[in-house]
Image (spheres, rainbow, N blue to C red):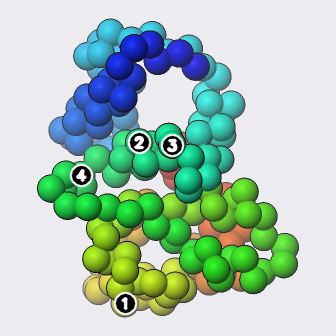
């Protein structure tokens, strides 16, 4: 993939365009016109590569910012594990390359992340969603599946598809 000079600036512009779009799907042609950048990639390879980036990778924050374009830029955000890292680590069959990847991460305001701590995802969603689980899941890009840690594999596959569709 080639971004050319100033690709972080272009990604920032893309985020702003996406935020202002009325549809949920990203119009890649509009983005390319706005930034005059040529991107050549094979969809599956590109998206799989980017979604497999781990939490501490330098690109992860930028990619998560693009996935969450409506974040208030005046606040500070953390890269938060949806299913807590420590909980996943205790499950023998889970792969760290999956549970520490973008697929299991979200952007979460720092104070919310501090209060969430290592709370299981299913408990956190129940506590925070109020009457509108569907809207909450949509805003946080969480698939509507069993969110228990025992169902991590299905959660991972469904969330991966959800993120690719964004």
Cβ atoms under marks 4 and 1 closer than 8 Å? no
- Real-space CA distance between mark 4 and mark 1, rounded to the nearest whole angstrom: 22 Å
In this rendered view, identify the residue nearer to me: 16 or 126. Answer: 16
In this rendered view, identify the residue nearer to me: 77 or 93. Answer: 77
Where residue 72 appears, as percent x and y from the top left, is 18, 56
What residue does disc 2 label? Answer: 62
Disc 1: CA contacts within 10 A as few (<14), some (14-19) or many (>=20):
few
- In the image, taking residue 124 as reference, residue 22 lies left or right, namely left
Residue at disc 1, secondary structure: helix
What residue does disc 3 label? Answer: 58
- The mark total stands at 4
- In the image, taking residue 6 as reference, residue 79 lies left or right, namely right
Of pointers 2 and 1, the one earlier in the residue sequence? 2
Of pointers 2 and 4, the one earlier in the residue sequence? 2
Residue at disc 4, secondary structure: loop
Numbered disc in front, either 1 or 3: 3
- Real-space CA distance between mark 3 and mark 2, rounded to the nearest whole angstrom: 8 Å
Numbered disc in front, either 2 or 4: 2
Of pointers 3 and 4, the one earlier in the residue sequence? 3
Numbered disc in front, either 3 or 4: 3
Residue under the point 26% across and 61% down? 76
What residue does disc 1 label? Answer: 127
Where residue 34 appears, as percent x and y from the top left, is 26, 16
- Real-space CA distance between mark 3 and mark 4, rounded to the nearest whole angstrom: 21 Å
Cβ atoms under marks 3 and 4 closer than 8 Å? no
Disc 2: CA contacts within 10 A as few (<14), some (14-19) or many (>=20):
some
- In the image, taking residue 104 as reference, residue 63 lies left or right, namely left
Residue under the point 32% across and 61% down? 77
Q: Quadrant of residue 126?
A: bottom left
Cβ atoms under marks 3 and 2 closer than 8 Å? no
Quadrant (top left, top right, bottom left, bottom right) of the C terminus: top left
What residue does disc 4 label? Answer: 70
């Amino acid at each position: 993939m080639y971004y050319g000079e100033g690709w972080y600036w272009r990604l920032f512009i893309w985020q702003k365009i996406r935020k202002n779009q009325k549809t949920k799907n990203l119009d890649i042609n509009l983005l390319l016109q706005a930034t005059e950048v040529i991107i050549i990639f094979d969809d599956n390879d590109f998206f799989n590569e980017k979604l497999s980036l781990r939490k501490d990778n330098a690109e992860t924050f930028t990619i998560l910012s693009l996935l969450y374009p409506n974040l208030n830029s005046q606040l500070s955000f953390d890269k938060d594990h949806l299913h807590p890292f420590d909980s996943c680590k205790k499950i023998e069959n889970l792969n760290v390359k999956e549970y520490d990847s973008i697929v299991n991460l979200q952007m979460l305001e720092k104070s919310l992340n501090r209060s969430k701590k290592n709370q299981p995802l299913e408990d956190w969603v129940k506590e925070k969603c109020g009457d509108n689980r569907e809207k909450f899941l949509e805003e946080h890009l969480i698939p509507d599946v069993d969110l228990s840690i025992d169902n991590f594999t299905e959660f991972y596959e469904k969330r991966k598809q959800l993120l690719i569709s964004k």
